[in-house]
Image: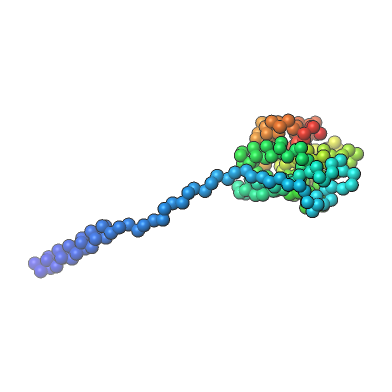
């Protein structure tokens, strides 16, 4: 009888403790902060400091430095993050170029890197590094008799490794892009007819070298050259 009474007392004490715990106020939580703002395309346009031109501009180029502009803009990378890139273009190309890269940003089209040509020894090094660029006062790759449209600053090359160029001698540029001559199935960073990048350039009236007999998948220009 005494054991039963003691057990009942212990049970009652445990129940009372449980009831006291259940009636205690829950720990307060800090109010949730506002959600992170959506990532937006941003850009800034300035004149071009000489250091950002380097050897990409020289005496005799068809466009003087004061007609060029430096665009700083964000873009999506292959790592799924946003990065800030730089590109030099002709002043008349600023608006169409910004339209295109804003559409590319909205579509989360990945760009490997975007650096001014002054950071490279030459175009071959920039292409091998998968660099997206515009102005560069140089001859046509694979055809040194002609001046490239890039010398006027109204042509853009995008992801050269994913979008190779086959010159008039059937040489692939850059050499490490050969695997991307196979265009199906589509892979990240490649440009295809009707995708966000091709459509945006078409909206501004620029033409794509990917449709040439010797395809230049990376190349877009205002005059189709």
Q: Quadrant of the N terminus?
A: bottom left
Note whether residue 221 is visible.
yes
Q: Is residue 183 visible?
A: no
Residue 64 horizontal side relative to residue 211, left or right:
right
Picture quadrant where residue 146 is located: top right
- Residue 70 at x, y percent in the picture: 74, 46
Q: Of residues 188 and 56, which is closer to you in this image?
A: 56
How many numbered marks appear? 0
| Res. 184 image quadrant | top right
- Report x, y in % for residue 79: 62, 49
Residue at 87% over, 48% down: 58
Residue drawn at 59 percent across, 44 percent down:
40
Q: Residue at x 81, y 34 (%)?
A: 225
Residue 67 against residue 225 in the figure, above or below? below
Q: Residue at x 39, y 56 (%)?
A: 29
Camera-nearest residue between 13 and 60: 60
Q: Position of residue 160 (x, y in %)?
A: 74, 43
Q: Position of residue 169 (x, y in %)?
A: 86, 38
Tell which of 179 and 80 is nearer to you: 80
On the picture, is 14 further left or further right than 194? left
Location of residue 3 with respect to 76 vertically, above or below: below
Going by the picture, which residue comes out furthest to the bottom?
2
């Amino acid at each position: 009888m005494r054991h039963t009474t003691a057990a009942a007392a212990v049970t009652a004490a445990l129940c009372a403790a449980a009831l006291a715990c259940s009636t205690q106020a829950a720990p307060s939580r800090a109010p949730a902060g506002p959600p992170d703002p959506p990532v937006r395309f941003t850009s800034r346009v300035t004149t071009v400091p000489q250091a950002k031109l380097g050897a990409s501009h020289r005496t005799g180029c068809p466009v003087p430095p004061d007609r060029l502009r430096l665009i700083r803009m964000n873009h999506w990378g292959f790592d799924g993050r946003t990065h800030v890139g730089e590109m030099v273009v002709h002043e008349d190309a600023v608006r169409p170029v910004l339209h295109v890269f804003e559409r590319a940003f909205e579509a989360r089209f990945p760009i490997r890197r975007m650096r001014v040509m002054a950071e490279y020894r030459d175009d071959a090094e920039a292409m091998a590094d998968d660099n997206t660029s515009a102005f560069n006062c140089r001859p046509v790759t694979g055809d040194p008799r002609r001046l490239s449209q890039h010398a006027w600053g109204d042509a853009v090359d995008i992801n050269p490794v994913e979008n190779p160029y086959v010159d008039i001698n059937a040489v692939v540029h850059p050499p490490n892009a050969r695997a991307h001559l196979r265009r199906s199935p589509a892979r990240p960073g490649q440009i295809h007819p009707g995708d966000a990048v091709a459509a945006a350039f078409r909206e501004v009236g620029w033409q794509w070298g990917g449709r040439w007999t010797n395809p230049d998948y990376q190349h877009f220009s205002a005059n189709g050259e």
